[in-house]
């Protein structure tokens, strides 16, 4: 699991498993642990130790496998039932509930905001009903999902509503003219921009260049998309410079106006591993960034209860399952730490050139090679690097980026495909924008650097880098 998912998983288990305790360092620093040293180990940052101490052993995997297969309920929390209250809180305030209480309220979604605005629109009742229907078809970008004919056909299944195409068109026009943000309710990007331009043109003292912008979007949209400025200049009998001035104003337009008024819940990227350079030893070292995770242990009270023959059989069975689920979770977290650090250690060794010199020096590193080196299954390596991030001297990097195939240069040096893409981007960034290289020319430029790939591969990598073709990169 990535860090945020692991945090959530631990929180869920702490809420539902009566046998799992969080170690409060301030109050319980001297309290005895009921597990071995490894299980009670604080989940704080620690440096990568290269050697036998950091190895996963066959016994580790076998023991976890037995726990997992024998107590599958650890995944589903069937025995950590919420019907049993957690008595160990001792009347203390629930910190999680306090945190929820202090969280800001969720902002209104775009549809909710538009519906609220629409209630104040002074239009006829049939237009009001049609508008309410259309608002449900407006996506988070602010654009209308589907054409009016399809919406009309689907509305026939709604009892008590009878609309016509003309009525929907009139309602959509009112939505586009009355509701904010400008551009909302557009059927495509071209219409979205035109609606925004019309708002600018309706303002007193507006820049007269907006009229030129409107003509460009309305009459020369396809040529604009393809950067065919000379063709537009010839048709309009104006200079390319005049067109470029109008295009500068277009930067004020938004192709997704709905995103401006809705706060998106973008989860932060929390690195799982911190990589730093040790100048004295001339090596890169790694530490787990799991200081945000709570320190866990198994409750002495419930561990004793699980072995007490005087306790009712059903209760003892319930407690026993909770104890074993807690044990499985703690051992799994420790196994996760060991596996992740071992995989990162291989990356630091095999990708040293990347950390020293940058992305263009990434080497091919198939996961099967790492799995063979560590003596684990390739699926374990895949899970270990999935959705994980490393904080490195070169910024935050997705761990999976270091694992790919590659090619050999003319000099015999191995380069990963990520390194080839980095080199391609460098070449494009340095090209003459008044005469950008075609894909075939880019292939030739890569050959000059010892990298021989076909033109179609250049096209694929360019598209993956979200770089447009030469005709759209040209600056006039």
Image (spheres, rainbow, N blue to C red):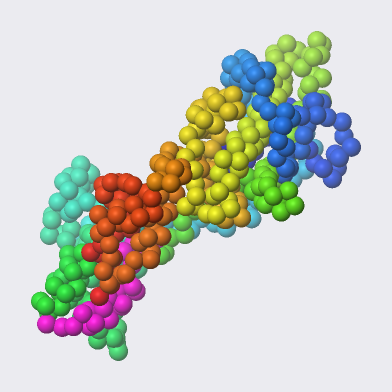
Q: Is residue 424 above or below residue 159?
A: below
Residue at the image position 33 percent from the left and 57 percent from the top = 445
Asked if residue 98 shows in the view, the reply is: no
Asked if residue 255 shows in the view, the reply is: yes
Residue at the image position 55 percent from the left and 54 percent from the top = 357
When asked about the image quadrant of residue 337, the answer is top right
Residue 226: image x %, image y %?
Answer: 21, 64
Image quarter of the C terminus: bottom left
Residue at the image position 85 percent from the left and 39 percent from the top = 28
Residue 407: image x %, image y %?
Answer: 40, 41
Residue 180: image x %, image y %?
Answer: 34, 68
Query: Is 284 on the left-hand or right-hand side of 462?
Result: right
Query: Is 459 on the left-hand or right-hand side of 105?
Result: left
Q: Work out which residue is located at the far right of the displayed protein and give it.
A: 30
**Towards the viewer: 193 or 78:** 193
Q: Work out which residue is located at the far front of the displayed protein and give it.
A: 411
Q: Is residue 441 above or below residue 242?
A: above
Q: Is residue 432 above or below residue 266?
A: below
Residue span colored magenta: 237-259
Q: Is the magenta region chiefly helix, strand or loop?
A: helix
Residue 7: image x %, image y %?
Answer: 62, 41
**Towards the viewer: 63 or 453:** 453
When asked about the image quadrant of residue 9, the answer is top right
| Residue 26 within the segment the image draws in magenta | no
| Residue 258 within the segment the image draws in magenta | yes
Q: Is residue 57 above or below residue 275?
A: above
């Amino acid at each position: 699991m990535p860090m945020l998912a692991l945090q959530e998983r631990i929180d869920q288990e702490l809420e539902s498993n009566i046998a799992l305790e969080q170690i409060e360092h301030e109050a319980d620093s001297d309290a005895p642990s009921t597990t071995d040293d490894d299980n009670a180990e604080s989940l704080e940052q620690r440096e990568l130790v290269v050697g036998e101490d950091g190895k996963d052993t066959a016994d580790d995997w076998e023991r976890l496998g037995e726990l997992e297969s024998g107590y599958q309920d650890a995944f589903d929390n069937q025995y950590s039932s919420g019907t049993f209250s957690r008595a160990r809180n001792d009347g203390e305030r629930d910190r999680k509930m306090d945190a929820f209480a202090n969280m800001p309220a969720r902002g209104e979604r775009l549809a909710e905001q538009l519906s609220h605005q629409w209630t104040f629109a002074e239009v006829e009742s049939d237009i009001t009903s049609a508008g309410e229907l259309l608002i449900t078809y407006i996506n988070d970008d602010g654009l209308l999902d589907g054409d009016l004919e399809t919406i009309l056909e689907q509305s026939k299944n709604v009892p008590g509503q009878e609309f016509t195409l003309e009525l929907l068109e009139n309602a959509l026009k009112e939505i586009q003219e009355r509701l904010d943000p400008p551009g909302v309710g557009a059927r495509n990007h071209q219409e979205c921009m035109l609606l925004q331009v019309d708002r600018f043109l309706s303002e007193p003292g507006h820049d007269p260049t907006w009229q030129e912008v409107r003509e460009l979007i309305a009459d020369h949209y396809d040529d604009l998309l393809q950067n065919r400025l000379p063709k537009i200049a010839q048709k309009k009998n104006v200079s390319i410079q005049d067109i470029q001035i109008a295009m500068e104003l277009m930067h004020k337009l938004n192709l997704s106006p709905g995103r401006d008024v809705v706060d998106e819940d973008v989860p932060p990227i929390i690195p799982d591993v911190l990589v730093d350079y040790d100048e004295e030893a001339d090596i890169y070292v790694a530490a787990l960034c799991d200081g945000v995770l709570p320190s866990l242990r198994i409750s002495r009270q419930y561990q004793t209860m699980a072995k007490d023959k005087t306790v009712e059989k059903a209760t003892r069975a319930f407690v026993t399952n909770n104890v074993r689920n807690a044990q499985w979770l703690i051992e799994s977290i420790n196994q996760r730490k060991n596996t992740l650090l071992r995989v990162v250690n291989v990356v630091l060794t095999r990708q040293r050139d990347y950390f020293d010199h940058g992305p263009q020096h990434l080497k091919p590193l198939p996961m099967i090679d790492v799995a063979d080196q560590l003596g684990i299954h390739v699926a374990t390596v895949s899970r270990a690097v999935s959705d994980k991030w490393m904080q490195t001297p070169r910024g935050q990097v997705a761990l999976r980026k270091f694992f790919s195939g590659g090619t050999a240069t003319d000099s015999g040096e191995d380069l990963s495909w990520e390194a080839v893409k980095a080199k391609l981007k460098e070449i494009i960034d340095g090209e003459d924008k008044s005469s950008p290289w075609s894909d075939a020319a880019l292939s030739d430029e890569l050959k000059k650097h010892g990298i021989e790939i076909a033109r179609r591969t250049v096209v694929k990598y360019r598209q993956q880098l979200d770089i447009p073709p030469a005709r759209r990169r040209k600056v006039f």
